[in-house]
Image (cartoon, coloured by chain):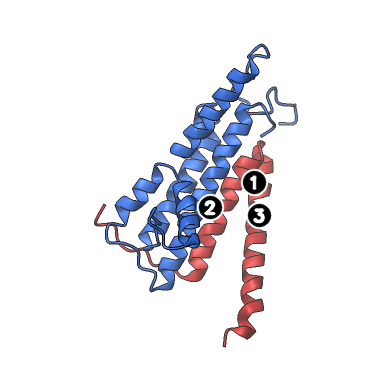
Chain colours: A red, B blue
Amino acid sequence: MNGVPRLDLTHFQAFLLFAVVISVAFGFLGRRRPKDRVKYILWSLFLFLLVGIGVGWAMFPFSR
Amino acid sequence: MDQPFQNPANDGTQSAPPAREAPSSRESRALAFGIAGWLLPGLGHALQMMWGRALVVFLAVGLLVFAGASMKGNVFTRQGGDAFDTLGFIADLGTGSFYVFARSIETNGADVSHAGGDYGTRLLATAGVLNLLAALHAYEAARGHKA
């Protein structure tokens, strides 16, 4: 395991990874029917992205 | 697709536990499933034949742990200096056996001097909390609660 290369992700890539993985996991745990799962995953992912990017822009004026 | 499922507690692939089962026996079984799910992500669901959920939990927690440790995130140990380290350790320990996997990847230690390392720390904590949630879900499903 010593040779595992360092993974360099940008903030957005790490955020996207988090949003996708958590949305899929919540979709499968929270819903049983495949159609409901897909709807839940897409809606959850959209809200993650919307809130994440929204908060990012809201903090922009205070970043300098 | 619209017809009701026979057992709301699982994926529809396993019959409900018999109604005659003693409550204490059912509770013990549910507790065992919960602990199994904590020790090996997805095992609590796999033991209840919830294959889809088991696979997703295993892959989600595994991917987050691998990404977090590869980004040189901080895998907290018991020897934490403050309350935040202790909380981080509890969250990391939530990944069960994957905690050992994360430690084995990070043989050279964490590097949070870059932003990537900080993101990795968060991904590792997320993996632990997600697995604890999944283990709780497996426990509740085994108790017969709607899941």
Q: Label for residue A38? A: 1
Q: Secondary structure at mark 2?
A: helix
Question: Relative to B86, does residue B34 appear above or below in the rendering?
Answer: above
Q: Position of residue B67 (x, y in %)?
A: 41, 57
Q: Which residue is mark 2?
A: A21
Q: Quadrant where the N terminus of chain B lies?
A: top right
**Residue ranking furthest to the top:** B20
Q: Position of residue B142 (x, y in %)?
A: 60, 27
Residues marked 1 and 3, same chain: yes
Comes first in the chain, label 1 or label 2:
2
Q: Secondary structure at mark 3?
A: helix
Query: Which corner quadrant of the image does residue B135 belong to?
Result: top right
Side of B113 relative to B94 (left or right): left
Q: Nearer the viewer, mark 1 or mark 2?
A: 2
- The residues tagged by marks 1 and 3 sit, at their Cα atoms, a distance apart of 10 Å
The answer to whether the residues at label 1 and label 2 have Cβ atoms under 8 Å apart is no
Side of B38 relative to A8 (left or right): right
Q: Chain of mark 2?
A: A
**Between residues B13 and B29, which one lies in front from this camera angle?**
B29
Comes first in the chain, label 2 or label 3:
2
The answer to whether the residues at label 2 and label 3 have Cβ atoms under 8 Å apart is no
- The residues tagged by marks 2 and 3 sit, at their Cα atoms, a distance apart of 11 Å
Dot 3 amino acid type? Ser
Q: Chain of mark 3?
A: A
Kindly tell me whether residue B59 is visible in this rendering: yes
**Residue ranking furthest to the left:** A2
For mark 1, does the 10 Å Cα neighbourhood hold few (<14), some (14 to 19), or many (20 or more) residues? some
